[in-house]
């Protein structure tokens, strides 16, 4: 079989306020597995979305076998045999249809022509053939809603293969998978490679990239950094490329006297992701939870906050063992959580800024018989808007009209009025621009100054180094390493959070 | 580049003006509709505006309003209680039977009816909160169950004073004169206004009401803010059952009998009133005052159309059309 060659030249794309890709070159061939890696926000996913036709406003050219091709829509990309499997498998599958129907979905949509009736025999037969050829043991007539995450992913890959498929993009396919499921995925990837398919593999887990890939391209801040043969490079070199030079100073400098232990967690276990986590946080201390996406940071935060089921282990505040069965108990006991998915979990988009800010401790704004004190709520909201620098026309504006960074400030702000002892921040800077980031860091430092215990969970290692005093590195639901911030480097953190030992 | 920018600006301005007009309609559309209807009906028949008729309208909407207020509370936690009609029937049957069959005093009769409704509310909330059946589905099932329970309780017959009992004797119990006042003007209107007013205060001015709206807006955010979500959902369903029972009791007093499935007919009008209420004064969410306005709109329509001799069988067409328009107003904005 003849190898095909794919080249992307001088690709640039801009979104309002951000240059997401800046003159990026990328090339790969079929019969190989190509790793694409970079820190969060480096532009990996954006580049692959360009390739799969998700954007039409980029500049630059795409060539296949030296001939320029026009890819501005997913349909065009598919016609050239470029298929993508996104990380969120559930968005691409119809849960109450069978595996076979899902695999043949594109075929049903575009190849039915004038036919009005479904040929179920043909669909299931064809789907079963594809599954068998890939050695996937999932019956074609099973409902997708009954599959595991890994099986769903395989169904999606099978769907891609059911079409003309020269290049298959897998966007962080292993993040939610267990070890054995990952092995199964790798087998499929190797099979595809043998069948003259070029696989582009996005992942944060360096060891597995070195296991499965032939070539590696590193990106940083929307720019192409390097392309090398896997055999000729090492994890350390790649990490260096990923990090580049240090970020400019945006972290507040402060000196805080660290007090007694406030929070102590012993053997926390959620029976799913979190395995036996022990940690402690002192008053005035900011403790980092470093780890890659999917390492279990969010799960830890939720378990600590009583928001997940089946939690075992002990949580102590100021030496007293707590009984935390629900977030309600957690708040009563002085815990505060700023969740990661703020639109889904942190704010009320339909409500006003003032309502959002008072939601977590409305008792402060009530008079006799639980009547609300609107005046107090308004004054306090105005104060917070000012002190947090929330850009909003008024406290009566609905939160859905604010920008992402300002929404995050609202999500954080609602906890600042409360007198919590322990603040847990889960990826507080996700999707936030640089200016707002700085405000958020200052807020967190301010909390520490007031003697609060702070847990800062993030996959942005530079931020962890910048703001914390001590760090726990989380890998695969466990604490892999505990380090003092002043004694460590991003390289070391990345080493442990990618599974290094 | 600059040309396209200018174009963008003007188009933005243009759309802003349209938006403002729409915003006005959204806020005041329902109230404007009511005013327009009043003008049309009054000019067609001056008797429409006589105080007798206005009281008549208010009386006719009072039961719908009370039941709709219950639905409003269930909607505020992003639930939906479809069992209120049946619960009203049950309360109606229980309260009348207490008088007629068992010769009980008024307070006890009302108390037992409310208790029966609270049991329904408790069962609803248990199935929703603990078993996690979606609100609308389980209250639909409960609607049938409670309807059947009410029918079984009355043995499929209408309960009235001096009715013939299964053993051939006559029922001796009498409905107390005090109870019969509840369903008459002015008390029926006063009860309705009191219910609307107190629930409006509850939802808008107390922390409990705020919690309910927070839960309705984003249950996960509410949970992670430390709000006891389940407790408030239970409260919401207990309240909606309670108001359904009050509606059923008022109905009992008004007709002095317990007809078969008497409350069922109020369900759809109540749902309509609560949904029309979403957009009143731009609230954008279920609210007691809006629900009242929605009920007034439906009441005026029904009354005016009767006065204009529109045949009863064509009324639902108009009612449904008004509801569709009100929903269009709410959801076009929400898009």
Image (tube, coloured by chain):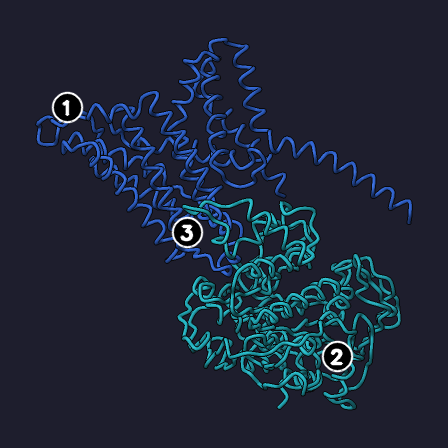
Which quarter of the rendering shows the C terminus of chain B? Answer: top right
The residue identified by callout 2 is A34
Between A440 and A475, the one lying in front of the other is A440
In this rendered view, identify the residue nearer to me: B246 or A143. B246
Occupied quadrant, residue A387: bottom right
Q: Seen in the image, is A15 located left or right of residue B165?
A: right
For residue A11, above or below residue A287 = above
Reading the image, the residue beneath label 3 is B232
What element does badge 2 sit on? strand
Residue B246 coordinates in the image, percent (x, y): 32, 35
Q: Residue A426: name its quadrant.
A: bottom right
* Callout 3: chain: B
Q: Chain of mark 1?
A: B
Disc 1 to disc 3: CB gap under 8 Å: no
Colour cyan belongs to chain: A
Left or right: residue B65 compared with residue A155: left
**Relative to A145, is A179 above or below?**
below
Which one of the lettered chains is coloured blue? B
Q: Residues within 10 Å of mark 1 (few under 14, many from 20)?
A: some
Kindly indicate the quadrant of the structure image that contains residue B266: top left
Of residues A13 and A295, which is closer to you in this image?
Answer: A295
**What chain is tagged by disc 2?**
A
Q: Both on one chain, marks 1 and 3?
A: yes
Q: CA distance from mark 3 to mark 2?
A: 53 Å
Rounded to the nearest angstrom, the CA distance separating label 1 from label 3 is 44 Å
Q: Residue at x 54, y 82 (%)?
A: A478
Name the residue tied to disc 1.
B162
- Sequence order check, earlier mark of 1 and 3: 1
Q: Point out the frontmost of discs 1 and 2.
A: 1
């Amino acid at each position: 079989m003849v190898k095909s060659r794919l080249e992307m030249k001088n690709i640039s794309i801009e979104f309002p306020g951000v240059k997401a890709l800046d003159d990026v070159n990328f090339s790969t061939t079929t019969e190989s597995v190509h790793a694409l890696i970079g820190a969060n926000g480096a532009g990996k996913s954006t580049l692959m979305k360009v390739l799969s036709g998700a954007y039409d406003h980029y500049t630059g050219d795409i060539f296949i076998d030296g001939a320029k091709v026009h890819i501005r829509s997913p349909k065009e990309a598919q016609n050239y045999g470029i298929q993508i499997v996104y990380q969120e498998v559930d968005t691409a599958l119809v849960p109450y249809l069978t595996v076979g129907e899902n695999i043949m979905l594109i075929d049903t949509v575009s190849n039915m022509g004038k036919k009005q009736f479904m040929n179920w025999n043909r669909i299931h037969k064809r789907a079963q053939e594809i599954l068998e050829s890939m050695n996937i043991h999932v019956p074609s007539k099973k409902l997708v809603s009954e599959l595991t995450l890994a099986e769903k992913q395989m169904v999606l890959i099978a769907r891609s293969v059911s079409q003309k498929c020269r290049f298959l993009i897998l966007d962080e396919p292993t993040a939610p998978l267990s070890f054995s499921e990952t092995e199964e995925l790798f087998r499929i990837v190797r099979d595809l490679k043998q069948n003259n398919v070029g696989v582009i593999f996005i992942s944060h887990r360096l060891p597995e990239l070195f296991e499965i890939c032939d070539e590696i391209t590193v990106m940083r801040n929307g720019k192409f950094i390097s392309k090398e043969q896997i055999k000729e490079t090492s994890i350390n070199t790649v990490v260096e490329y990923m990090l580049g030079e240090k970020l400019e100073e945006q972290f507040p400098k402060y000196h805080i006297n660290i007090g007694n232990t406030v929070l102590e967690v012993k053997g926390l276990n959620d029976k799913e992701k979190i395995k036996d986590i022990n940690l402690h946080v002192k008053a005035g201390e900011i403790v980092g939870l470093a780890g890659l996406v999917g390492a279990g940071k969010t799960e830890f935060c939720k378990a600590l906050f009583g928001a997940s089921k089946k939690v075992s282990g002990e949580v102590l505040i100021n030496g007293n063992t707590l009984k935390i069965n629900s977030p309600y108990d957690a708040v009563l006991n002085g815990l505060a959580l700023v969740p990661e998915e703020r639109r889904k979990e942190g704010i009320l988009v339909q409500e006003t800024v003032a309502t959002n800010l008072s939601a977590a401790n409305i008792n402060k704004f009530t008079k006799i018989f639980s009547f609300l004190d609107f005046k107090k709520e308004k004054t306090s909201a105005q104060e917070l808007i000012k002190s947090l620098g929330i850009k909003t026309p008024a406290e009566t504006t609905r939160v859905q009209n604010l920008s992402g960074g300002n929404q995050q400030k609202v999500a954080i702000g609602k906890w600042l009025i409360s007198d919590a002892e322990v603040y847990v921040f889960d990826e507080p800077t996700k999707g936030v621009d640089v200016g707002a980031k700085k405000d958020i860091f200052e807020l967190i430092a301010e909390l520490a100054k007031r003697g609060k215990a702070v847990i800062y969970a993030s996959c942005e290692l530079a931020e962890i180094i910048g703001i914390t005093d001590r760090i726990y590195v989380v890998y695969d639901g466990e604490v892999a390493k505990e380090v003092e911030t002043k004694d460590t480097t991003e390289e070391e953190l990345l080493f442990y959070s990618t599974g290094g030992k | 580049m600059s040309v396209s920018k200018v174009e963008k600006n003007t188009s933005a301005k243009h759309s802003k003006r349209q938006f403002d007009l729409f915003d006005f309609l959204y806020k005041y559309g329902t109230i404007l509709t009511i005013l327009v209807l009043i003008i049309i009906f009054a000019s067609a028949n001056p008797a429409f505006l006589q105080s007798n008729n206005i009281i008549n309208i208010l009386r006719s909407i009072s039961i719908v309003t009370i039941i709709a207020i219950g639905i409003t509370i269930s909607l505020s936690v992003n639930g939906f209680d479809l069992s209120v009609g049946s619960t009203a029937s049950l309360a109606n049957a229980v309260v009348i039977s207490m008088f007629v069959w068992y010769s009980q005093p008024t307070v006890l009769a009302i108390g037992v009816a409310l208790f029966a409704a609270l049991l329904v509310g408790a069962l609803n909330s248990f199935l929703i909160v603990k078993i996690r059946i979606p609100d609308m589905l389980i209250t639909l099932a409960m609607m049938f169950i409670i309807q059947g329970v009410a029918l079984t309780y009355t043995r499929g017959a209408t309960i009235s004073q001096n009715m013939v009992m299964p053993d051939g004797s006559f029922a001796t119990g009498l409905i107390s004169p005090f109870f019969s006042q509840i369903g008459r003007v002015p008390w029926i209107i006063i009860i309705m206004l009191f219910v609307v007013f107190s629930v409006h205060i509850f939802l808008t001015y107390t922390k409990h009401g705020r919690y309910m709206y927070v839960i309705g807006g984003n249950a996960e955010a509410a949970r992670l803010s430390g709000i006891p979500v389940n407790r408030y959902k239970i409260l919401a369903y207990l309240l909606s059952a309670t108001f359904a029972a009050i509606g059923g009791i008022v109905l009992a007093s008004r007709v002095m009998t317990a007809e078969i499935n008497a409350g069922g007919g109020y369900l759809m009008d109540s749902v309509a009133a609560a949904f029309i209420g979403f957009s009143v004064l731009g609230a954008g969410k279920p609210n007691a005052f809006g629900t009242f306005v929605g009920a007034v709109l439906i009441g005026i329509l029904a009354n005016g159309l009767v006065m204009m001799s529109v045949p009863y069988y064509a009324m639902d067409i108009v009612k449904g059309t008004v509801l569709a328009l009100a929903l269009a107003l709410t959801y076009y904005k929400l898009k």
